[in-house]
Amino acid sequence: MQDAITHLLNRIGYGRRPGDIERVQEAGIQKYLDQQLHPERIHDAVAEARLASFPSLTMRTPQLVERYPAVQKFARQFRIPQGDENKRDVRRQVLAYYEENGLNLPQKLLQELESQKIVRAVHSERQLQEVMTDFWFNHFNVFWSKNADRWLTTAYEMNAIRPNVLGKLTDLLMATAKSPAMLFYLDNFLSSSLKGINENYARELMELHTLGVDGGYTQKDVQEVARAFTGWSIDGPQRNGEFMFRPRIHDDGEKIVLGHRINAGGIKDGEMVLEILARHPSTAHFISTKLVRRFVSDNPPEALVKRVADVFRKTDGDIREMMRTIVTSPEFNSAEAQGAKTKTPFEFAVSSIRVLDGSTDGSRQLAQAIARMGQPLYQCQPPTGFPDRADHWMSNGAVVERLNFAVALSANRIPGTTVRIDDSMKSIALKLGSPEFQKR
């Protein structure tokens, strides 16, 4: 029973804390799973109190642009030649101005975004919600450092990803498609029937978000989908930062996507495309494969993938029911599945803190340690997101960094993070760098 509970805590959460196994055993595995599948029913006061330290999480884009402005905004005021923004004397002058006026550099937004992710993973009782938020952000990846996405990514995770992680795929697709962060990242906000149609979002929508590369679409489908999304834009990427449909630049001709005829309907053209893709059999298989790979094995058992895809089709893409099918499956609960997945650097760091009964404010130093292990948070540049396979994470250099992290954590040398190292914890601390602890 304890092995089964440990496995569950490792897969639908970020590992056990002292006492977790006993709590799940007392409640029962099924009841615990039901609770995790409904995070809105879980009291989470500790994590929520800690999130109050990150004011940017509740700000709208105009506030973020005003409070966390780019240095370039003051280039003329400080007579900064182009390209000289990072010179030491210039930077000192600008930082003094920021401090005097209660401003922060945009990099502070990334730090708060990283910190809230770490704090939630370590302290939240809604463990499955945190794992699913990580999964879906990676699936619908955007790159924080791409210009205006520095001010748009926070709202993307808070408003598009997080509320929909256990809902219907159609809602998640619609939320990400209309997110300014995604529209900017894949350049769709520039796509115009008048000045040129951009196919980036159309291609990634089918290849990475829904059908998969072998999902049965053609280049003609890419072109038609791109036409459907012309006019899906942003009202000032670095000003208001809100979704805006621009009818004037929308291609209002008829489209044919995957055999479906779409009559000219303005914004409804793109919405219909999303509904077609969300209900396509290839999407059911592709999404099911990715979920089974994340939660069961790097080599997803095809029989389980098919069962999950069946649930997808029967429930109109209900992610909660897909997850229930995965976690209660014989494949998930098999001996072969236990310890079959390698922890990402983020999973390794967070599970290390949790197992040692630690606490953290998600400091910059902790995020930097995770980056050194190979996973800079919110900084994956390609739209593929980070790979979900062991061979990507366990290079010789990455293993050394994991050992260094284990030593620093066990010695309480990571600012903002403390762990409990008493006699009952010393043996656990010694195992953080072991091959077994790298697995989940």
Image (tube, grey):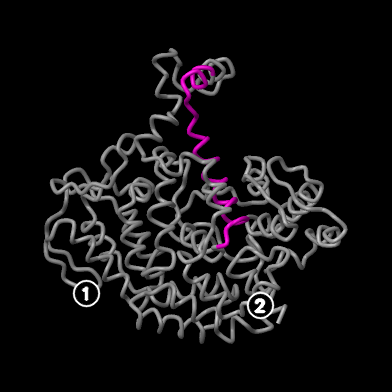
Residue at 57% from the left image edge and 17% from the top image edge: 92
Predominant SS of the magenta segment: helix
Q: Position of residue 227 (x, y in %)?
A: 21, 57
Q: Position of residue 40 (x, y in %)?
A: 45, 64
Q: Secondary structure at mark 1?
A: loop
Q: Position of residue 288 (x, y in %)?
A: 46, 75
Residue at 47% from the left image edge and 66% from the top image edge: 41
Q: Secondary structure at mark 2?
A: helix
Say whether disc 2 or disc 1 marks the residue closer to the N-terminus: 2
Residue at 66% from the left image edge and 47% from the top image edge: 360
The quadrant in which the N terminus is found is bottom right
Q: Is residue 49 left or right of residue 202?
A: right
Q: Position of residue 224 (x, y in %)?
A: 22, 62
The quadrant in which the C terminus is found is bottom right
Q: Is residue 334 left or right of residue 49?
A: right
Q: State the residue in front, 285 or 200.
A: 285
Using the image, determine if residue 234 lies above or below residue 11.
above
Tell me which segment is drawn in magenta.
96-125
Count of residue discs: 2
The residue at which mark 2 appears reads as 26
- Residue 378: give its label: none
* Mark 2 or 1, closer to the camera: 2
- Look at label 2 and name its amino acid: Glu
- Residue 259: give its label: 1
Q: Would you say the residues marked 2 and 1 are in contact, meaning their CB atoms lie under 8 Å apart?
A: no
Q: Is residue 342 left or right of residue 56?
A: right
Magenta-colored stretch includes residue 119:
yes
